[in-house]
Image (spheres, grey):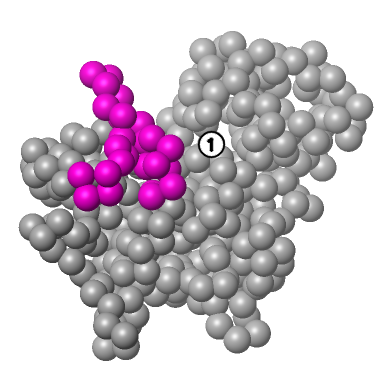
Amino acid sequence: MVVTAFMNDDHGRMDLQQLKYVVEVASSSSFTRAAERCFVTQSALSHQIAALERELGQRLFVRSSRSVRTTEAGEAFLAHAKTAVAAADHAREAAAAAAGRVVGTLRLGVIPTVTAVSVPHAIARFREAHPEAGVQLGMGNSDALAAAVRRGELDVAMLGLREGVTPSGVASRELARERLVAVVPSTHRLADRQELVLEDLAGEVFADFPAGTSGRAQSDAAFAGSGIPRDVSFEADSAELILGLVSAGLAITLLAPGVVSAAAADAVAVEIVGGPVRVEYVAWDARAPRAVATAFLRIIGLMPRGDDEAGPEESSEPASSVS
């Protein structure tokens, strides 16, 4: 049996490039942004998708002046298009790996408060070692990033979880752990203290990450466990914004000391005796890690192999060497 893997649009048969265009348009909800990502003109991309729609006899996208969305047929087609594009990428990467090269794009997700690894320096070292590889960097909360790794949408993620909670459904390695500190305005009544306990913070107004996120869970669990009510009047996704609220005298907060020391906020960090602990992890898909993922883990002093590999639902010991 002969199978034609790549077919020419000029003869009315779909090719891999058209599938990539469909995936990018669906991902960005925009023909303009998809064309930019694919390094082609919008007219060329639109022409190719229109030709594909004529071949299929189905509209894949509904276009309006403000957005683009997939049709029911488009959603059905998209699932298979993603599989085909991913398979082609993996085939190319496997061929390159056999020749000792690392190619492709590393999809890296990080929490905004990562401190265990200098992400810019790690990326610089990765690119220096593997100049043919690229990096797609995104930020989010730990739960969303771990879910993206499980779905195969990210290759590696840097997470921050409260003590006693480990990433589920992914391979992981502990990178570091820090006890949170209280961060108060420089004029606050507790600013001169060397240390304090959670009870000292009763009645204060707090700024914190949104309820339900991993960044918030550390503090919520600590106060709930101590039976101390807490007034979180301000919520923000960014540690920088939270520290800005503290500097303005509007609230206090609990953050990892590494996050506070890296900021230029007009605030004071005070140790909390027996306070909550945040544990940072690196997570990846152990079932079939891409070459770019393995290469990046090696760059930061980790590499999934043999008995050192932490399988899904597991976490190994803290890494001994992380740059």
* Residue at the image point whose x is 55% and y is 23% from the top: 236
Q: Residue 226: where, in percent of width, then height? A: 89, 32
- Determine the residue located farthest toward the right in the rendered image: 227
Q: Which range is magenta?
A: 54-78
The quadrant holding residue 54 is top left
Q: Is residue 197 magenta?
A: no
Q: Residue 202: where, in percent of width, then height? A: 82, 19
Q: On screen, 300 above or below 23?
A: below
Q: Is residue 319 left or right of residue 204?
A: left
Give the residue type that dot 1 points to: Val
- Residue nearest the observer in this picture, 168 or 300: 168
Q: Which part of the image, by quadrant, shows the N terminus?
A: bottom left
* Residue at the image point whose x is 65% and y is 85% from the top: 307
Q: Which residue is mark 1?
A: 260
Q: Is residue 12 left or right of residue 168?
A: left
- Can residue 243 be seen by looking at this rendering? no
Q: Is residue 221 left or right of residue 247?
A: right
